[in-house]
Amino acid sequence: MAKRLLFEIGTEEIPANFMSGILEQVSALAKKQLEELRIPYIAVNALGTPRRVTLLVEGMAETQADSTVEAKGPSVKIAFKEGAPTKAAEGFARGQGVDVKDLETRGDYVFAVKHLAGQKVVELLPDFLSNILSSLSFPKNMRWADHETRFVRPVHWLVALFDDQVVPVEFNGVKSGNQTRGHRFLTDDKMTVIPCANDYEKVMTELFVMVNQLERKVLIKRQVEELAAKEGGHAEIKEDLLEEVTYLVEWPTALCGKFEDRFLALPKECIITPMREHQRYFPVLKEDGTLLNKFITVRNGGSQFLDVVAHGNERVLRARLSDAEFFFKEDRKQSLADRLPKLETVSFQEGLGNMRDKSERLVKAAAALAKDLNAKVNTKDLERTALLCKADLVTGMVVEFTELQGVMGREYAKLDKEGEAVAKGIFEHYLPRFAGDILPATEIGRIVGIADKLDNIVATFSRGLAPTGSQDPYALRRQALGVINIIIDAGYHFSMQKTLATMCQLLNLPNADKTGELINQIGEFIRQRLKNMLIDQGIRYDVVDGVLSNAKNDDVADLCKRAAALNEFVTKPEAAELVQAATRVNNLCKKAEGETAINTNLFQKDAEKALYKAVLAVNKEILPLAVAYNYAGVLAAATKLVGEINKFFEDVMVMDEDVNVKNNRLALLLAVQDITNGVGDLSCIV
């Protein structure tokens, strides 16, 4: 008979941003152990609220599945002499816990076969649940009282039920039982009995706890949307904020608050940022996207005294917006350009100057990159953007609300009449700020953004602070991915090595003799980010390896085009023959040395002449295709050589005794290799 397992870990309030990862761990650990313990089940669910982490296993068997264990022993010759078991056989049988007469002979060896009956599951559950508790890891841990064990927050109660049977588990002095606690404020917070695991959700609902986070999330979104519509607008619901609010409450009730109209004179972001980032409120917008003087928040409780709760939230937000209003007015007493000298007081990185130095460096770096790209941009606007892009770091608004860097630079640039291109560029040079963020849409924003991120990467690497393992305090991986995504989105073709060399030169690094080594290290770092990104996008790993095998190609956009074309090509019927032929060519080309020029007078076989003629024809065809980055066309053209390559290998002995003939044939194969590997090393393809 299938049963239900309930395991609830009752704690003090867990940080909302920890919860998603904790629940994923609980689910994964439970599934792994259930498989290892051979316990049949139907489903595993991990539920969570701020005060509890819950594991529910549905349709759990009462008994382990039976199993058969086999162990290979000594050879038959050693195990038996004249049909009688030897000491070796007896020792093996004894070690495996079977009778020597039950050993089985299979081929040349003996085996011990044990048929194990499944144990009662209830006997396995204490260790099963204890292992889950002890295996959980958290971004930050706590130790409380005089206990040495650490956990995300102090544990106050444990519920462990196998249907209605209590499973004995103990953690830091807390013993499991069948009693839980309800909502901290809507109940008396006394212990309440859960008669059976199947009653869990019903009991929790009676205790004003909506334990299923997915149901809470849906309810919160619906409440916020309905309330915003009732107030004459629509709520701007960001997924990350919605998830955070979901894990902040156990019994959600949305409510609307207001703020004074005068604050609407501030830039929209100056209002939304304190609202969303600091107070976890949802802003309410009109249909045209302008902001209403209203916000929606979610209370962890019922619908009583909502006006009092709303008033309290309004007071908190009013203080925040008053600060924003003050800083905005103070900031407007100086232009961005007037703030440049103050950037000298802000350190960039140790031993590498200040942010004023960086701003002036970005002017030169952006100009150099624009020249390499032959970009059609207004030079004055580009230089002005690079010079002013960090000036908002010393404004009161950004010092108080750091999330507004770039945003305030854009707003202040507009007010300073710097021009739309400069204002946009200042904002866009920070993009993308996080995974999934928008990319810069203007040439100026892209170029200054690439220059800024590469400057950060080079500076940090030069100090020996390259990311290691999971440690990346300067977010260099994110910045490298940002550079790659901007390049791909814009279709920029330039040499990464050359640009990195320019960055090193502008930084005026102390160990100039090690610049080459540093550039190679950073180049490989960026290349690894590109590799991971391509694989995440569904490009086959062998295709990625083949494309990235050419270390001399450091054009990121070009490498991406090659990967996309080759990934599509390898699925076609004609791909297998080209890959096979190219691999044979590659293997022989490894033996090439010395002269690589082709001498047609040394051709002895018709197959040599035919292959050479085909190489000339295909080379002529693929040249304009490669220039246009049409790598699908290059691969299609390369397949035209397959027949001549195969005929060549049938009729020609490449490693001829005559050294000149041998080298000439290898030179011909090198020319073939240039075509077959024109997109990527096909010998890497599995």
Image: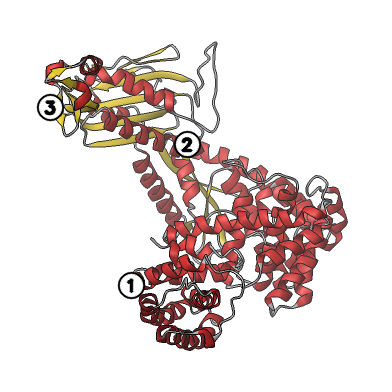
- The amino acid beneath tag 1 is Lys
Contact? badges 1 and 2 (CB < 8 Å): no
| Residue located 15% across and 15% down the image | 99
The C terminus - image quarter? bottom left
- The amino acid beneath tag 2 is Leu
Quarter holding residue 139: top right
First reached walking from the N terminus: tag 3 or tag 2: 3
| Residue located 45% across and 54% down the image | 228
Give the label, 1 or 2, closer to the camera: 1
User: Circle 3 sits on which residue?
Assistant: 1
> Horizontal and vertical percent for residue 444?
69, 71
Give me the C-alpha separation between circle 3 and circle 1: 52 Å
Q: How packed is label 1: few (under 14 Cα within 10 Å), some, or many (20 or more)?
A: few
Q: Residue 572, labelled with which disc? A: 1
Q: Residue 342, labelled with which disc? A: none
Q: Is mark 3 on a helix, strand or loop?
A: loop
User: Vertically, is 528 above or below 578?
Assistant: above
Decide if residue 348 is on the left or right side of residue 238: right
**Viewer-proximal residue, 606 or 329?**
606
Give the label, 3 or 2, closer to the camera: 3
Quarter holding residue 212: top left
Q: How many marks?
A: 3
> Horizontal and vertical percent for residue 547?
50, 65
User: Circle 2 sits on which residue?
Assistant: 248
